[in-house]
């Protein structure tokens, strides 16, 4: 066996695609985590149909905000497989609302899911990896973790935070043989906008055009997994020239980028759909 890969947010979207890709490659034992056990069982069935042994795919429901359970979840994985070689922190929720309308509790909820949940599970896994002097920690951030995007103040806040945390963690633990990767996707076809939070905390319920026309999740997973296995430390992925260009503009010409985003925001306001 090549290793034990633990994926959170594995019940749909990019997380599900990661599971399918590791299954397609073969030789991995997989831990699939999210809140919805029925959906995790569906993903497991797909992995088994692709050649994974059923005993090598563990369905482990996890609520990343229930941080008091994380040590126990780690023990469950270790009892089942004996080790954790890679943890992909992929659970998360997005946002579609203007700051002036958004309840503070919505910001708290996003931060609990997208930041503290990832940090807590990482800290629970870290002692095991330090003991072995081996392991790989990854987190799914976003282009919004590098670029402040309209209607996503909370999401950008959270994704900037995980970029900062995992970048700092990387330099602290590199000498112990533990690798850290930050995944920075643009728009990927998924339910992320449908499940995003409105100003009042309810689900947005609408498929954004940019998400609907985003990168195919299987192509995303193939690219990301290959770079994870190569231990690349930052992994931008996406097919939108605009989104990938914004990453470069943030470094090379931030003033022009700010002007561009203000123009995009004016267009969104003119549409009046939010």
Image (spheres, grey):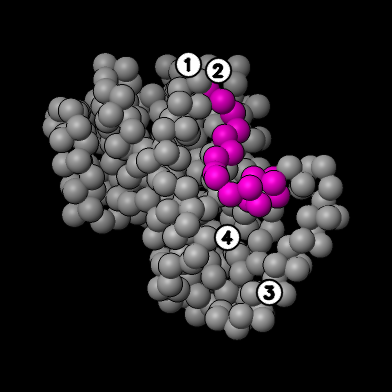
Mark 3 packing: few (<14 Cα in 10 Å), some, or many (20+)? few
Residue behind mark 4 = 155
Dot placed on the residue nearer the N-terminal end, 3 or 1: 1
Q: Position of residue 9 (x, y in %)?
A: 37, 49
Q: Is label 3 in a helix, a strand or a loop?
A: helix
Dot placed on the residue nearer the N-terminal end, 2 or 1: 1
Q: Is label 4 in a helix, a strand or a loop?
A: helix
Residue behind mark 3 = 267
Asked if residue 72 can be seen in this view, the reply is no
**Is residue 227 toward the left or the right of residue 32 in the image?**
right
Q: Is label 2 in a helix, a strand or a loop?
A: helix
- Cα distance between the residues tagged 3 and 1: 51 Å
Q: Which residues are magenta?
A: 231-247
Using the image as rendered, state which of residue 218 and residue 126 is in the foreground: 218
- Cα distance between the residues tagged 1 and 4: 33 Å
- Cα distance between the residues tagged 3 and 2: 49 Å
**Is residue 201 toward the left or the right of residue 55 in the image?**
right
Assess whether mark 2 and mark 3 are in contact (beta carbons under 8 angstroms): no
């Amino acid at each position: 066996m090549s290793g034990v890969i633990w994926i959170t947010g594995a019940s749909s979207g990019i997380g599900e695609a990661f599971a399918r890709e590791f299954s397609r490659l073969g030789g991995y034992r997989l831990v699939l985590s999210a809140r919805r056990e029925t959906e995790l069982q569906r993903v497991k069935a797909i992995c088994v149909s692709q050649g994974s042994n059923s005993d090598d795919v563990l369905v482990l429901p996890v609520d990343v905000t229930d941080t008091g359970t994380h040590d126990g979840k780690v023990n469950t994985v270790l009892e089942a497989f004996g080790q954790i070689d890679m943890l992909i922190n992929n659970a998360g929720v997005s946002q579609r609302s203007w700051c002036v309308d958004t309840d503070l509790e919505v910001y708290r909820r996003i931060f609990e899911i997208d930041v503290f949940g990832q940090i807590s599970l990482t800290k629970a896994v870290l002692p095991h990896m330090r003991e072995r002097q081996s392991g790989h920690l990854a987190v799914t951030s976003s282009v919004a973790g590098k670029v402040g995007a309209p209607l996503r103040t909370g999401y950008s806040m959270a994704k900037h935070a995980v970029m900062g945390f995992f970048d700092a963690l990387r330099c602290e633990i590199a000498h112990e043989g533990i690798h850290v990767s930050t995944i920075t996707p643009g728009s990927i076809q998924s339910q992320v906008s449908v499940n995003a939070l409105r100003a009042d905390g309810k689900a947005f319920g609408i498929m954004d055009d940019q998400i609907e026309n985003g990168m195919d999740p299987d192509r995303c997973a193939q690219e990301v997994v290959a770079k994870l296995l190569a231990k690349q430390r930052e992994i931008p992925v996406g097919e939108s020239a605009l989104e990938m260009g914004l990453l470069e503009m943030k470094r090379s010409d931030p003033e022009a980028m700010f002007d561009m985003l203000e123009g995009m925001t004016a267009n969104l306001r003119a549409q009046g759909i939010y």
